[in-house]
Image (tube, helix red, strand yellow):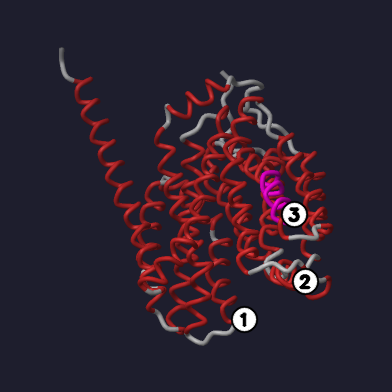
Amino acid sequence: MVQQPAHPGPTGFRRGVLLPSLFLLVAMLNLTLIVAGLRELVIDELGGSSRDAGLFFSIEMAAYIVFAPLWGLLSDRLGRRRPFVIAGFLLSAVLYAAYAIADSVSLLLGLRFVQGAASVMAWSTLMAMVVDAAEGSRRGRWLGLMGGALMLGVSLGAPLGGYVSRHLGARGPLEVAAVLFLIIGLGSLALREPASLRRQTPLREVLGTLRARPRLLVPYAFYFVDRYTVGILVVLLPLYLGSLGADPALRGRYLAVFLLPFALLQYFTGRLTERTGPYPPLLLGSLLYGVALCFVGVSGLHGLWYVMAALGMLAAIMFPPTLVLTAELSEPATRGSAMGGFNLAGSLGFAIGPVAGVAIGERYGTGAAFVSAGGLEIAAVVLAAGLLLEARRRRGRAEARTTEPA
């Protein structure tokens, strides 16, 4: 048997981790690039409503939920990932270019659903490729690098989109996104299929392997809750800040205090995961994150700077362990499906979070919405810790039975 290297070599790292992470950064940048000019496009140009502007994001999330697991299953079934990445990015480029001819809200939203299906085909499968490549002792830092690239793209997209909208108009960010997707689509031709991936895996075997690994539900559940809380922060935090008299620019700075540590610290917290294993940073980080969330709605403008910075640092501790667990608990032949399920859970949390947060906020107040989100995070920690302790006890009893003399 040929022993696997402890970590990818320089060429393997560049093609298997670094280049895909760069492509993921650009793909996530496009996710928020269009935010700044959305009101002008949907309401001013096409005569839509604020609800239509919200649907522009909700419909994309719906496409992620529907198609992320499907593309993962197909990539595992065919034993190929690169064609899905290339096709998804190039189709996204075509669809973003097609937004230029949209002359009605209904056409815009229809294109958005198809574009969401194409985009998630590319970036979810590309995440699976990074997980495939990030084997061995340096898995935590490489997956932390990927997670940091994802969040840095999300963080930079909105301010860059505002600059583009100011100079190129409301459709300018969509045109820039089309060009960027074309570039990374063509760049994806340089990617290589993971060496660990089989050429063909029967669909029944893929599904059977996934069913045999119920512990994948642990990272899925945490990612669902994490994205749920981020959805609440993105929607309710500006409303809370507005009630305290903060102008739009100040609101953006508060979000930046959260997003930038979240993006920039993940490589280092990934290295921490290599030392401790995924569970200690995941459970401790999530517990402290949940506690900090409870203080968002009761902090004044001054104290909120520290709360948001703490949330960003703690979120950076939480995300790499969920990626590592998804990698460890899945086989190479089912990683596409595993990452599809992972992204389905996150998209579902992000879609539900704002709706639930607004409903709780309207009935009980904004502070209660943040407390409920923090309480859900803490409850997830308590439940996961209980399940892990019970699993450890069962293993201990099983080992004791096997060592008993006949």
Q: Residue furthest bottom?
A: 245
**In the picture, which quadrant includes the C terminus?**
top left
For the magenta stretch, what is the residue range?
A: 108-119
Q: From the image, give the main secondary structure of the stretch colored magenta.
A: helix
Q: Residue at x 50, y 46 (%)?
A: 345
111 in the magenta segment: yes
- Residue 253 sits in which quadrant? bottom right
SS at circle 2: helix
Q: Which residue is mark 2?
A: 165
**In the picture, which quadrant includes the N terminus?**
top right
Q: Which residue is mark 1?
A: 249
Three-letter amino acid code at disc 2? Ser
Three-letter amino acid code at disc 1? Ala
Q: Which residue is mark 3?
A: 107
User: Label 2: how many residues lie within 10 Å, few (<14), some (14-19) or many (20+)?
Assistant: many
SS at circle 1: helix
Q: Residue furthest top?
A: 406
User: 178 left or right of 22?
Assistant: right
65 in the magenta segment: no
